[in-house]
Image (spheres, helix red, strand yellow):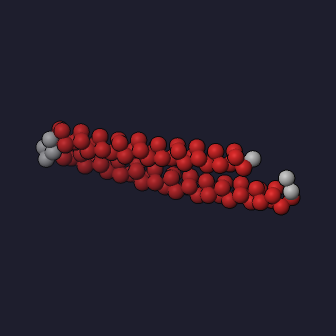
């Protein structure tokens, strides 16, 4: 491998690591936002339950939708991490 190729690979690795760090920072911010939203949703559900504004089925539907979104988010994060690791592995 030539020096230019080695330098190029080193630059690509640095760029990927920088992008991955930026991704993790944004995901941490998104997770913090999701946690805040979940707390607000739970508080709102408790209030609505106490006021009998929603039936139990509707509350379960809300939580089910939230849990599906959380599962999909986790799946996307894992796939992005796996892809990043695969790309870095192929560069090595």
**41 relative to 71 in the view: left or right:** left
Closer to the camera in the image, 59 or 12: 12
**In this rendering, does residue 49 appear at all?**
no
Give the vertical position of 54 relative to 20 (above or below): above
Instruction: Kindly identify the residue that appears in the image at 47 percent across and 43 percent down.
Output: 75
Q: Is residue 90 left or right of residue 49?
A: right
Residue at 18% over, 46% down: 48
Q: Residue at x 66, y 54 (%)?
A: 17
Residue 86 visible in the current orientation? yes
Which residue lies at the image location 61% right of the left edge and 54% below the top edge? Answer: 20
Report the residue that reaches farthest toward the front.
1
Report x, y in % for residue 74.
46, 43
Q: Nearer the viewer, residue 61 or 36?
A: 61
Q: Nearer the viewer, residue 4 or 31?
A: 4
Q: Is residue 21 left or right of residue 52?
A: right
Which residue is nearer to you in this view: 10 or 74? 10
Number of numbered discs overlaid on the protein picture? 0
User: Which quadrant holds residue 3?
Assistant: bottom right
Residue 33, given in percent of the width and then of the height, sits at 42, 54
Query: Which residue reaches farthest left?
Result: 52
Q: 64 left or right of 16?
A: left
Residue 8: x %, y % from top left: 77, 60
Pinpoint residue 29: horizontal percent, then vertical percent. 49, 55
């Amino acid at each position: 491998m030539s020096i230019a190729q080695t330098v190029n690979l080193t630059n690509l690795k640095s760029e990927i690591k920088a992008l991955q760090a930026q991704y993790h920072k944004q995901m941490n911010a998104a997770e913090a936002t999701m946690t805040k939203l979940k707390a607000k949703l739970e508080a709102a559900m408790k209030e609505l339950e106490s006021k009998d504004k929603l039936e139990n089925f509707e509350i379960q539907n809300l939580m089910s939708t939230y849990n599906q979104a959380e599962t999909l988010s986790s799946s996307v994060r894992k796939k992005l991490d796996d892809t990043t690791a695969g790309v870095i592995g192929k560069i090595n």
